[in-house]
Amino acid sequence: RTICALIITAALYLTLRRISNNTLEQLNNLNATLEQRVDERTRELIAANRGLEQEISERMLIEKQLKFLANHDPLTKLPNRTFFCKRLGHAIEVAERKHNCLGVLFIDLDRFKYVNDTLGHAAGDMLLTEAAERLARCVRKSDTLARLGGDEFVILDEEIDDKSNLADLAQRIIDELKRPFQLLGHEVTISASIGISVYPE
């Protein structure tokens, strides 16, 4: 009986050990499969997250570009008519409230059409871009320089201490634009016509 009990016990032990080993092996296999799936899913989520981040960045860039284009001239990068009109409206409200003066200079490039017609649109665009850069050098950072369209530019001066400063600014612009332009191997000279208006007069 003792031998039988020992044999049965040993058989049970071996059976349980085999079951335990099988179970352990199955658990290890399941654990490895689970880890593999977690790794795969993690990689998928990281890739998806990168894709979303890139899409968000691209959308933000597009929104920024659209906002810029809505308020700026694509050729000269200056503020456009829409932006200028908003700025002028606000400046008039402030000047009215504070009883200040502000000035507007309207600038038209003389002979631009002639340059455009004889040398082509590429030369005309170069002339407008260079003229915009020269105008920007004449104004202060507090002034607003905008391109209204075609060969028309405008400057808003919100801080007038002396109205004669507007005439001085106009003369500086005329002198700056009189200097020859180099356009596609051609030396071109133009001039500018400038109108000045003072608020509230």
Image: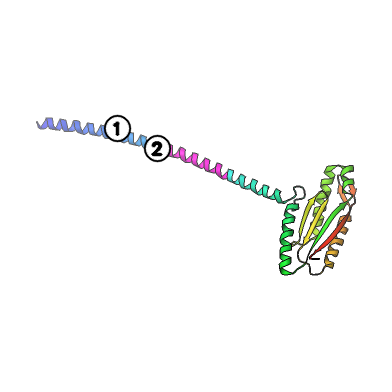
Q: Is residue 95 above or below residue 64?
A: below
Of the pair 9 and 37, the residue shown nearer to us: 37
- The stretch drawn in magenta includes residue 155: no
Count of numbered tags: 2
Q: Identify the residue shown where x is 40% and y is 35%.
A: 33
Q: Nearer the viewer, mark 2 or mark 1?
A: 2
Q: Identify the residue shown where x is 73% and y is 62%.
A: 91
Of the pair 132 and 147, the residue shown nearer to us: 147
Query: Which residue is tagged 2?
Result: 34
Magenta span of residues: 36-54
Residue 52 left/right relative to 5:
right
Residue 73 left/right relative to 46:
right
Q: Identify the residue shown where x is 83% and y is 43%.
A: 122
Main secondary structure of the magenta stretch: helix
Determine the secondary structure under disc 2. helix
Name the amino acid type tagged 2: Leu
- The stretch drawn in magenta includes residue 44: yes
Query: Which residue is tagged 1?
Result: 22
Residue 38 is situated, as x and y percent measured from the top left of the image, at: 43, 39
Residue 73 is situated, as x and y percent measured from the top left of the image, at: 75, 49
**Mark closer to the chain start, 2 or 1:** 1
Q: Is residue 80 visible?
A: no
Residue 113 is situated, as x and y percent measured from the top left of the image, at: 88, 46
